[in-house]
Image: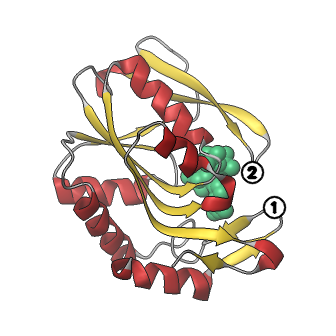
């Protein structure tokens, strides 16, 4: 959409392609962060999820935290980040396993039951949607908790990895602010 033109221009200007369909955006999202752009993106999420009943924002550490807290700040809602390390004491924790294609390993994602409860209406926010494995893990945690998933918002969706197709086919309200059609030949092709 037109509103996210600045994000698309930034991706084309500062994004770097790597082998295996990886887009590095370390200049404004994953290492150095641009809070002005991050705020604009959060405003756009608020607009796109305005029709949804939400009482909590959920993300996964680490890179999801910045966009998630911006959205939580704007909506004045608490922000919960799922943790990637199992805590020493697992009592009162919900856990699921996620396979990472980029790292070729499986990791645990956990959240305390105190912060994800039946009756919660959760908006999940993250930086990237690729194969959607992290998102599937979140769906599992939300299901285990008895909470409801109100939607999932991503800064960047890599359409060629089809996680978005899966989530939308599940009936989830998915919003991605920039969609990458292809990184073939280390050329960034954006949707629109
Ligand atoms: P998936 O969850 O969509 O299936 O993807 P995958 O397992 O491949 O993603 C693992 C990690 O890599 C996630 O972050 C995800 O956000 C990130 N990621 C996936 N594709 C890209 C990409 O093209 N560029 C960048 N920069 N990141 C990508 P994470 O490892 O959990 O780490 P964190 O940065 O959130 O701590
Ligand atoms: Na991430
Ligand atoms: Na990441």
The residue lying furthest to the top in this view is 91
Residue 129 location in percent, x, y? 56, 54
**Which label sits on residue 166?**
none
- Residue behind mark 1: 20
Left or right, 98 with respect to 8, comes to right
Q: Do the residues labelled 2 and 1 touch (CB within 8 Å)?
A: yes
Residue ID at (47%, 36%) = 170
Image height of 95 relative to 74, above or below = above
Quadrant in which residue 134 is drawn: top right
Using the rendered image of the protein, determine whether residue 176 is visible from the camera's viewpoint.
Answer: yes
Q: Which colour scheme is used?
A: secondary structure
Q: In the visual, does 169 lie left or right of 46?
A: right
Q: In this view, does 16 lie above or below 128?
A: below
Q: How far apart are marks 2 and 1 (CA)?
A: 8 Å
Q: Residues within 10 Å of mark 1 (few under 14, many from 20)?
A: few
Q: Which of marks 2 and 1 is nearer the N terminus?
A: 1
Ligand 1 has an atom within 8 Å of the beta carbon of the residue at disc 2: yes
- Residue 131 versus residue 66: which sits nearer the camera? 131
**Which residue does the numbered mark 2 point to in the structure image?**
102
Q: Can residue 87 be seen in this view?
A: no
The image quadrant where one finds the N terminus is bottom left
Image: 168 above or below 149: below
């Amino acid at each position: 959409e037109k509103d996210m033109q600045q994000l698309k221009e930034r991706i084309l200007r500062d994004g770097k392609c790597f082998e295996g369909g990886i887009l590095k955006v370390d200049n404004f999202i994953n290492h150095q962060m641009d809070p002005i752009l991050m705020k604009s993106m959060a405003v756009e999420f608020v607009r796109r999820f305005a029709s949804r009943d939400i009482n909590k924002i959920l993300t996964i550490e680490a890179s999801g935290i910045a966009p998630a807290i911006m959205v939580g700040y704007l909506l004045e809602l608490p922000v919960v980040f799922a943790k990637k390390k199992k805590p020493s004491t697992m009592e009162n924790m919900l856990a699921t396993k996620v396979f990472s294609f980029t790292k070729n390993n499986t990791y645990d994602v956990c959240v305390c039951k105190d912060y994800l409860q039946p009756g919660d209406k959760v908006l999940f926010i993250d930086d990237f949607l690729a194969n959607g494995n992290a998102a599937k893990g979140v769906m599992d945690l939300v299901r285990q908790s008895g909470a409801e998933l109100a939607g999932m918002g991503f800064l960047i969706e890599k359409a060629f990895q089809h996680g978005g197709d899966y989530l939308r086919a599940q009936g989830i309200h998915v919003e991605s602010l920039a969609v990458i059609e292809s990184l073939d030949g280390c050329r960034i092709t954006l949707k629109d």
